[in-house]
Image (cartoon, grey):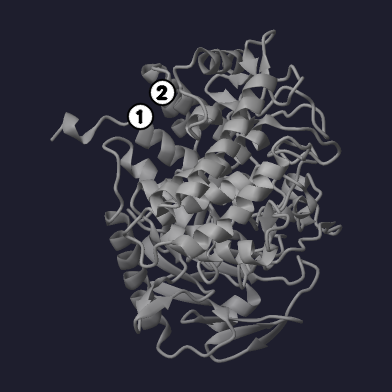
Amino acid sequence: MSTLDLGFVGNCCFGALIDKEARVVWCCLPRFDGDPVFAALVNGKTGEDSKSVFAVDLEGLETSEQSYVHKTAVLKTVLHAASGSVEVIDFAPRFFWRDRIFRPYTLVRRIRRLSGTPRVRIRLRPTFDYGAITPRLLRGSNHVRFVGPDLNLRLTTDAPVDYLMEERRFNLQGEINLIFGPDETLTGGVEEMARSFMERTVGYWRSWSERLALPLDWQDAVTRAAITLKLCTYEPTGAIVAAITTSIPEAANSGRTWDYRYCWLRDAFFVVRALNSMGAVGTMENYFDWLMNVVAESDGDHLQPVYGIDLERTLSEHVIEHLPGYRSAGPVRVGNQAHEHFQHDVYGNVMLGAVQTFFDTRLSKEAGAHDFHLMEAIGNKAYELYNKPDAGMWELRSRSAVHTSSSLMCWAACDRLAKIAAHLGETGRVVHWRKRAKEIKRFILDNTWSEKRKAFVDSPGSEHLDASMLLMAEVGFISPDDPRFVSTVEALEKTLARGPHMMRYEAPDDFGLPETAFNVCAFWRLDALAKIGRMEEAREIFEALLASRNHVGLLSEDTDPVSGELWGNFPQTYSMVGIINGATRLSRPWEAVV
């Protein structure tokens, strides 16, 4: 049975998921939103009869362990059988070469005998068109080509090609190397290239990790979260995907299956801010370039909440009928209807994602007056729409309302524009944007407080609670010691908390009441608790959330609060952001030990 006990490797161009038995069960090429050439995760099968998988089978497998090479995105899986043990190293090459970053859509697998006389079998079964097409195989002396309608791939190896073609078991005597990627001839020997790529990739990630500004506590968890966020950036354009999978359901047989291989402006803001807090500002700079293209193309008009990683505006959603889905619980969707939505919080998320570029002198190109005036068009839309109905940040598909969370982010857009204007010395614009921010704030305070619930609610006139109200203090809208915010936190805990976990909202949505907790809401909760002085409670919750990660420190979108099982697309950037923010907020200061 498929689970989300998976390791994640990538190189900021594509990613792959590998289970604890060294099977690649998900990998889209040539980029995150491409064709999943390995799609066993959603085709209902991962065993010997599975198609669309890249497996290293150890005969008589008894146990396995999986971990990352410390401070890297290089994954190690060790398989044990009575006959012997093998080690499988997986990575996607990423390093500087000839004064530029080298990140081909290539997966390298190195298989080494550790003990005994292990017998292994390689099952390399890529498919095309979401598993509908089996490629034509062409054999060479030390490679196999996989020819498809739109993409050709190649495996180059120093293992016996005959054994691979026939999927025959053989005794592993030493080490074999498998380099899978573009249909191109390698420029060097297989073993030499695999070893060199690995050494340089390990060196890259260790160098990157060692430059992070880490908190005193939970450093391993934070480093793993930061690497994971970095891996979810599509570096050629600067976009940041919400996750690398599609259609992992939020709960069993819930029908809540979505394609997250795109860039949500909301999620990207949180990713950028988390990495900025650790000194990894390069991602923000790259994302800002992508974002300014989005702003320029909108020309002051409607901004979508989500775009393709190459700025695609149309992400038409359709179902892949021949794929049964994760644990046969489809549907498997490609595209996302959210590109059609009006979600007014997007204007605040754009501003929040960009504001640091106007103040941070570490950047190679600091944003200036021209960028500010482009961003004012975003503020104008925020002001125009702050009290208008939309689909909300939870992307309701069948109804609209004036959502408090959207109004809150529209306020944030105007508030940050006032701050940028002050920084740039644009006195008249400071007055203009402060006035607009004040108007929106008054609307929220006057219309979204429920005396009955003693809390801010999800919409004006509503009595329903929503975890997004926890962001009020996070974005600076209200002081955390304001009695109304403290009361809101208490009401949300009483209604939506499930142990350390947190539901999104209490009102039914298009699919009824959600069954699983939304991981980032739990991190919002502990942040709010820390802000209002309940630090020890927050630390206890944080430890419990860390314990809910999978075996290599990754989180998906949702968690079953009863069983603790992970659900939803994976790995989820929103959730990994929570780990960084939580550790940064709750860690002891460095002064405690130095």
Tell which residue pokes out farthest to the left in this image: 594
Q: Is residue 133 above or below residue 412?
A: below
Tell me which label, 1 or 2, sits earlier in the chain: 2
Quadrant (top left/top right/bottom left/bottom right) for the C terminus: top left
Image disc number at residue 323: none
Gap in angstroms between the C-alphas marked 1 and 2: 7 Å
Residue drawn at (43%, 18%), measured in percent from left and top? 532
Q: Secondary structure at mark 2?
A: helix
Q: Is residue 359 visible?
A: yes
Label 1: few (<14), some or many (≥20) within 10 Å? many
Quadrant (top left/top right/bottom left/bottom right) for the N terminus: top right
Front in this rendered view, residue 352 or 199 = 352
Residue underneath mark 2: 530
Residue drawn at (80%, 31%), measured in percent from left and top? 509
Front in this rendered view, residue 474 or 60 = 474
Q: Position of residue 569 (x, y in %)?
A: 64, 47
Q: Secondary structure at mark 1?
A: helix
Residue underneath mark 1: 586
Q: What's under tag 2, amino acid-wise? A: Ala
Q: Is residue 313 left or right of residue 104?
A: right
Residue drawn at (73%, 35%), measured in percent from left and top? 387
Do the CB atoms of the residues marked 1 and 2 lie less than 8 Å apart? yes
Q: Is residue 222 left or right of residue 272?
A: left
Q: Position of residue 535 (x, y in %)?
A: 37, 20
Label 2: few (<14), some or many (≥20) within 10 Å? some
Q: What's under tag 1, amino acid-wise? A: Leu
Tell which residue pokes out farthest to the front in this image: 428
